[in-house]
Amino acid sequence: MTLLFPAMTSEFTFPHTPRPAASTLSAAHGTDLSGRAALVTGGGSGIGLACAAALAAAGAEVHVVDLDAEKAAAVADAIGGRVHIADLADAAVIDTLPQDVDILVNNAGLQHVAPLPEFPPERFSLMQQVMVTAPFLLIRRVLPHMYAGGWGRVINISSVHGLRASAYKSAYVTAKHALEGLSKVTAIEGAPHGVTSNCVNPGYVRTSLVESQIHDQAAAHGISAGDVLSDVLLSRAPVKRLLEAEEVAAAALWLCGPHTSYITGASLPLDGGWGAN
């Protein structure tokens, strides 16, 4: 059986810690991004929204890129940013996006879950286009500006699946592993120019995609949503809760801060100890 997980609203609530307000993030890390321009893909919701809000709170001018025009416009309006409607599966669209960017957050992505013999090749290809080819083209587009200014931050929102694998997620795992490699090459080439490139590797984040995945699996297996969360998604993580999008954004913001210029080519796991097992 092939499962797709569209965004949906859930009435089920999951345990979580209080979310830090976006306005407090810059103060928490001493990060002043005034005069910097940032571009965030998938900025209309979830991790991308949180990153856009955090960077804007730190003073950056934020370009919000998303396929969903309504969501992107709402985020841009809320943070005083600029909206760009783009289907990143179309390589030609990349040339319409800003070049004069100091901070690039490659976040846009999608998921499809199916056994390898049943995995649709066209879906596999689409996921590579959005999560590998688009980041490559964006990095290629903005690096000249970063090099000219002697400063730049490329932040790739990877995943714990960029470091390890799970069954039925061949396209996602492949794409995230490729993104890790691309990030490292960017780090090596960018180092002489003051440009760092790093991956942030979240475990399961509280997003509409993950919550719908929980409900779909609960229905498919005849168990409760809480049991899916604890016994399936978080079975390998000692910390038994979903990660908050604001926590991922805080890590991205930290990588833009004044004390991280020596951190490059790294992968920062936010996995609740998953990698320790």
Image (cartoon, rainbow, N blue to C red):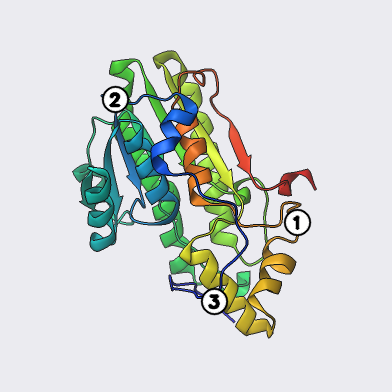
Q: Which mark is residue 3?
A: 3
Q: Quadrant of the N terminus?
A: bottom right
Query: Disc 2 and disc 3: Cα gap in Å?
Result: 43 Å
Residue 255 appears in view: no
> Which quadrant of the structure image shows residue 221?
bottom right
What residue is shown at x 60% (from left), y 65% (from top)?
14
Above or below: residue 67 compared with residue 115: above
Q: Please say if the residues under marks 2 and 3 sit with CB atoms less than 8 Å apart.
A: no
Amino acid bearing label 2: Ser
Q: Please say if the residues under marks 3 and 1 sit with CB atoms less than 8 Å apart.
A: no
Q: Position of residue 213 (x, y in %)?
A: 55, 71
Q: Position of residue 142 (x, y in %)?
A: 30, 31
Above or below: residue 102 compared with residue 229: above
In the foreground, 88 or 101: 101
Disc 2 secondary structure class: loop
Amino acid bearing label 3: Leu
Query: Circle 2 is placed at which residue position?
Result: 34
Query: Which mark is first along the chain, 3 or 2?
Result: 3
What residue is shown at x 71% (from left), y 57% (from top)?
240
Question: On the rendered structure, is 201 left or right of 60?
Answer: right
Question: On the rendered structure, is 90 left or right of 272?
Answer: left
What residue is shown at x 53% (from left), y 25% (from top)?
264
Above or below: residue 24 compared with residue 108: above
Disc 3 secondary structure class: loop
Query: Circle 1 is placed at which residue position?
Result: 236
Query: Which mark is first along the chain, 1 or 3?
Result: 3
Amino acid bearing label 1: Arg
Disc 1 secondary structure class: loop
Count numbered badges in the picture: 3
